[in-house]
Amino acid sequence: NAGVTQTPKFRVLKTGQSMTLLCAQDMNHEYMYWYRQDPGMGLRLIHYSVGEGTTAKGEVPDGYNVSRLKKQNFLLGLESAAPSQTSVYFCASSYYSPREETQYFGPGTRLLVL
Amino acid sequence: GQQLNQSPQSMFIQEGEDVSMNCTSSSIFNTWLWYKQDPGEGPVLLIALYKAGELTSNGRLTAQFGITRKDSFLNISASIPSDVGIYFCAGQLRGSSNTGKLIFGQGTTLQVKP
């Protein structure tokens, strides 16, 4: 099992450019999440999904869109990148089950917006 | 939004020393989780707590779910250099089990001097 994988690992964008971050999991998890991590801020939830075809906003959704067309994939899109979106992005997934709230994280995508 | 206050923000200790960190909130949590993040990696689960008062160990790590359900602590005994990293607490608010959403603390950065 690869667990949770993220593509790409690192990217540099110019302000106004768009890109899509891909998250894939092979654990048949129902729930998937996108976080951003900034120094001193911990992990903040951007968007999440409780199943294929469903998405919902998290704590900091502005400037991002997501799609979950397949259960194993969760895509995070930046339509028009801004320097404030420079961050490390983590994807996570978990089961739909009490006492299984553990979220499994990918290795992260480091994004620099110039 | 909901917040977890994690302290201390950072610690610089000597190898062999014990470490203690904690998280508090004004809200009640169903679940407390402690994660460790190595440099350049995603967070990895250390300990999960599901019941108020629960005390759980994982090797040199011990964590407790506070009786009030609003706090948790993590202790590391006899620290070693590989304990270096960022430690995050995370909690699942009562009523969030249908989304699996977690609230993360800001993290405690631990450095260990050999």
Image (spheres, coloured by chain):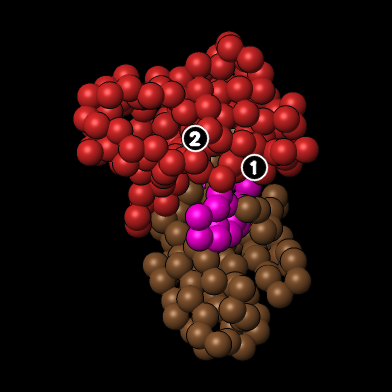
Number of callouts in the render? Answer: 2
Q: Nearer the viewer, mark 2 or mark 1?
A: 2
Residue to which mark 2 is pinned: A8
- Give the residue drawn at x 65%, y 64%: B64
Q: Are marks 2 and 1 on the same chain?
A: yes
Chain under callout 1: A
> Which colour represents chain B?
brown
Residue to which mark 1 is pinned: A104
- Closer to us: B13 or A50: B13
Say which amino acid is labelled 2: Pro
Residue A39: assigned label: none
Chain under callout 2: A
- Is label 2 in a helix, a strand or a loop? loop
> Which colour represents chain A?
red
Give the left or right position of residue B33, taking residue B103 as reference. right
The answer to whether residue B40 is above or below residue A55 is: below
Give the left or right position of residue A52, taking residue B105 as reference. right
Q: Quadrant of the N terminus of chain B?
A: top left
Give the left or right position of residue B14, taking residue B67 as reference. left
The answer to whether residue B41 is above or below residue A11 is: below
- Is label 1 in a helix, a strand or a loop? strand
Find the distance from the CA under tag 2 to the CA under tag 1: 18 Å
The x and y percentages for residue A15 are: 22, 30
Q: Quadrant of the C terminus of chain B?
A: bottom right
Q: Which residues are magenta?
A: B25-43
- Give the residue drawn at x 66%, y 18%: A71
